Image: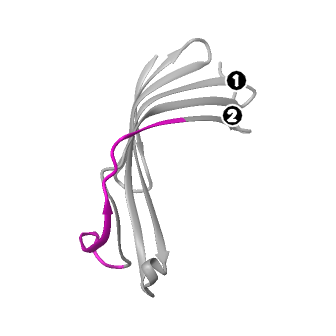
Amino acid sequence: MSALVLGFSNSIAQTKAYFRKEVLQNGRVSIGSDLNSTIFYLHDFQGSDKVYTFSQMEINSGLTYEHNLGRSFIATLMSGIKTIPRARIFEKNKPQRDYVWEASPGPSFYMNAGLSFNPFAKKRK
């Protein structure tokens, strides 16, 4: 069985788009992209008494393999390319276009492995 999966965060914006296909008896492969952001405050940035905001958007595109190990455990292996179009630091409550620092790093390879436990998982029929 194949499926197109679109994921949404708490806002209206779409954050994920994956094409999934079940493989083997207990596995599935997904290919697609997801959009993440990192935002946090910086105090005492460059000796200033002002508070600044660090903001960065990340696009992770790649391949994911998930395997149901049984009894509520799922092993995951993800790999692909991480792209950060822009990262900026700007004064808190000011527009991002008034930034004091900016970076546009090149794409990089990423790889994640994980093990998940879901105590509420239902048995598959």
Cα distance in 3D space between marks 1 and 2: 12 Å
Farthest top residue? 24
- Residue drawn 53% across and 21% down? 28
From the viewer's perspective, is 84 left or right of 30? left
Extreme-front residue of the structure: 46
Q: Give the mark, 1 or 2, whose residue is nearer the N terminus.
A: 1
Q: Is residue 46 above or below residue 76?
A: below
18 lies left or right of 85: right
How packed mark 1 is, by other alpha carbons closer than 10 Å (few <14, some 14-19, many 20 or more), is few
Q: Nearer the viewer, mark 1 or mark 2?
A: 1
Q: Quadrant of residue 3?
A: top left
Magenta residues span 93-111
- What amino acid type is highlighted by mark number 2? Ala
Residue 5: x and y, percent?
41, 33
Q: Nearer the viewer, residue 106 or 86?
A: 106
Residue visible at 42% across and 85% down?
Answer: 50
Residue that badge 2 annotates: 121
Q: Is residue 44 above or below residue 89?
A: below
Residue 106 magenta-highlighted: yes
> Where in the figure is residue 106, as x and y percent of width and height?
33, 45
Rendering quarter of residue 49: bottom left
Q: How is the image coloured?
A: one colour
- The relative height of residue 122 versus residue 49 in the rendered view (above or below) is above
* Secondary structure beneath label 2: loop
Amino acid type, mark 1: Leu
Q: Which residue is mark 1?
A: 69
Judging depth in this view, the residue of 17 and 88 nearest the camera is 88
Q: Which mark is residue 53?
A: none
Front one among 14 and 106: 106
Picture coordinates of residue 27, whole percent (x, y): 58, 19
Q: Left or right: 96 with respect to 40?
A: left
